[in-house]
Image: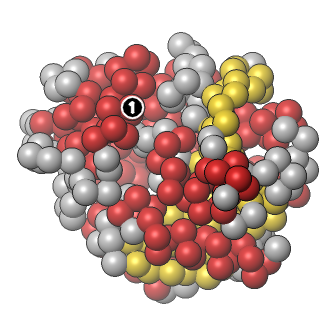
Amino acid sequence: MANKEKFMEVRHCQVATNGIMMHVAEQGDLSATPVLLLHGFPELWLSWRQQMDALAANGYRAIAPDLRGYGDTDVPDDPTAYTIFHIVGDLIGLLDQLELSRVFVVGHDWGATVAWHLCLFRPDRVKALVNMGVPFFERHPSVKPTDQFKVFGEGFYVTQFQEAGRAETSFAKYDVLTVLKKYYSIKIDNLTAPPGMEIMDFLEAPTSHPEWFSEDELQYFSEKFQKNGFTGPFNYYRNMDMNWALIAPWQGAKIEVPTKFIIGERDTGFISFGTGTYIKSGGLKAIVPKLEVVAIDGHHFIHREKAEEVTSEILSYFSSLN
């Protein structure tokens, strides 16, 4: 019982990395096999709470940072300080500070994008990857991401997030708790607002929080986003074109790290934005050759909505490679 209680404890620390202080939550024995968990938008380390419990109980060391611009990690004012080089650099610095040469990695949403690029830039630091929600897409040689998104119209959420201050003003019409409930309750086809409407105004305001999110967790998230706002997270989107330019040297490169990709069958991206066709046609496998794909009945926040099933997929994959 004493050992189990030790595993269930969450340790918190601040780590100096790449010019910022990063908040890190850890669970499990310090000598155990490390697993780095990368959250998405608009989330925090706490998004992985169920997975952290299970990983620690199964002999792993779960490491879940608040990414740059989130939670109790530093929030640089400079919008250009949120490129993929900065964010992956933060993680390399974190691993160096923790004296970890190689780790298993789990990512979701923006955390998945960061994880893909960690594998692309530094495959020597990653044993294997489990990613969720956002697949790896080969860089288009001549068209910037924001130009590619024009097909979805001016109301597309990524397009609306590009202009400094625009999304902040829209989000500020609502209290943070309402913003989070709206975003976590996104269903099919709700990521493009009608002409003349902001995405946050368009999203439905649910009468209650999702059943997979406790009231205490929502309050914690609300407090952290109330403290820092959303500008740091929006800056990830505002650097998409800059990232496109920066990763030109990796044009045509493949992700060679062993990978399991988990997708919710009712995820908006899977259904409405071509992700499903891309995966089923072998497009993802062509650039991630050591790939397994698992589809689960659920929406975008699949790691919360179907936490037990997702956790089982993570544990079975890593144990097969460990």
Please state the horizontal and vertical placement of residue 27, each as a whole percent of the image: 67, 47
Q: Is residue 316 left or right of residue 215?
A: right
Q: 45 or 187, which is in the foreground?
A: 45
Relative height, residue 277 to residue 159 (above, below): below
Q: Residue at x 56, y 75 (%)?
A: 312
Identified at 75% across, 64% down, the residue is 59
Q: Nearer the viewer, residue 291 or 221?
A: 221
Tell me the residue at 44%/80% (across/down): 295
The picture quadrant where one finds residue 187 is bottom left
Q: Please, what secondary structure does the residue beneath circle 1 have? A: helix
Residues 275 and 67: in front is 67
Location of residue 125 (image quadrant): bottom right
As drawn, which residue projects farthest toward the bottom? 281
Which residue is pictured at 72% across the width and 34% down the height?
90
Q: Which residue is mark 1?
A: 220
**Residue 85 can be seen, yes or no:** no
180 is higher (above) or lower (below) than 105: above
Q: Is residue 308 above or below residue 160?
A: below
- The N terminus - image quarter: bottom right
User: Percent position (x, y) of residue 152?
Assistant: 26, 54
Name the side, left or right, on which 63 lies relative to 108.
right
Q: Would residue 212 be found to the left or right of residue 119 on screen?
A: left
Amino acid at pointer 1: Tyr
